[in-house]
Amino acid sequence: MRSLHYLLSSLSVAAVTLASPIVIPEHEGNLAVRHSTTNGFDNTLSELGTKAAKKPFYAIAHRCNNISAVQQAVNDGANAIEMDLFSEGKDGWWASHDGPSENGTRAKEMFNTVAAHRKAGKPITFVWLDFKNPDACDPGKPAEWGCSIAALRDLARQILEPQGVRVLYGFYGVQNGSAYRLLESDLTANEALNVDGRSAPLQQFFNKNGPSDIQKRVASYGWTQLEEGFGNCTESGDAHLTCTQLRQEVISGKFGKVFSWTAVMDQVQLVQKLMGVGIDGIIYGLEGPYGGNSTQALAQIRSLLAQYGGYRYAEISDSPW
């Protein structure tokens, strides 16, 4: 019992000591500094908790198909880049919406530019590669290797991914050609697959064709004129309406990310409604090449995010998949 008494006394002293600030006599004047340091640590923890609780939002610069477009998007503060990829036979892959190559820039040059910006500390989290003709060339034929999807994938892995830039391979509709199958069979941790379409057909497609990891399944839906066929976000069934389809994709829980397209300047109310249904980001900018009022469109999106408590602007450290 006596030993127990001593033990309890010791524990009481220890508890009091731990509950009190430690003051070294000759340094009592530093006590405020010690409290300040502790408070700073508490504030840091609070900030980290707030950051973790908010959903990262990706503002994806539309149609960055040349070096100057990428530069402007970076200057504007875009945290993701969308570029069109067109296979041009013996000339390989180009960032071009329609081809031929004079309308764009070689993919390798574009990738090097993006990688350099990321290395310099710009928050380019991922590049969305919007394929226009993914099955144009057969990687099994030596003469067609350079314009095949395998060659483009290797370029992305050699240039973008080592710098921390993730890659989103984008397909239209529920197509399942050889390019899709090749990419799906060998995705790295930095890569994901996007298919544009309605919620129900997309779920069926991904369940059948993969990837099995939901985080690697990225859905998208939208229109070049966002206000057309927008809907009220609450329609039932398989309505071909942008906000409604995106809401269904989000609430299904069957996709790692859900993106919309394409927002331009002065569409704040539409973007706010899309945020209300929980999208992860949106392509913004004019229907044509990046430029014009794209800068203002992004500024409006970021201003809206500052008012919308559930989101924060995605940073360089955020991994979308």
Image (cartoon, rainbow, N blue to C red):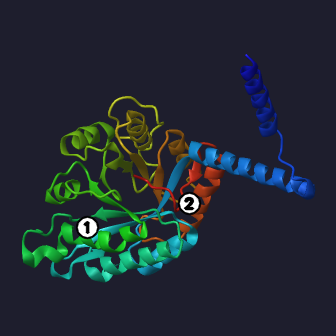
Disc number for residue 153: 1
- Label 1 and label 2: CA atoms lie apart by 33 Å
The answer to which of marks 1 and 2 sits earlier in the sequence is: 1
Q: Position of residue 133 (x, y in %)?
A: 21, 65
Residue on which disc 2 sits: 265
Around disc 2, counting alpha carbons within 10 Å, would you say few (fewer than 14), some (14 to 19), or many (20 or more)?
some
Of the residues shown, which amino acid type is indicated by label 1? Arg
Task: Tell me where residue 102 sits by quadrant.
Answer: bottom left
| Image: 70 above or below 79 | below
Q: Secondary structure at mark 1?
A: helix
Mark 1 vs mark 2: give the one in front. 1
Q: In the rendered image, is residue 248 in sight? A: yes
Q: Position of residue 259 (x, y in %)?
A: 42, 50
Q: Nearer the viewer, residue 70 or 40?
A: 40
Q: In the rendered image, is residue 217 in sight? A: no
Which residue is farthest left? 141
Task: Residue at 42% x, 31% y: name it.
Answer: 235
Which residue is farthest top? 1
Of the residues shown, which amino acid type is indicated by label 2? Met
Residue 97 lies left or right of residue 77; in this view the side is left
Task: Residue at 33% x, 68% y: name it.
Answer: 84
Q: Position of residue 306 (x, y in %)?
A: 65, 51
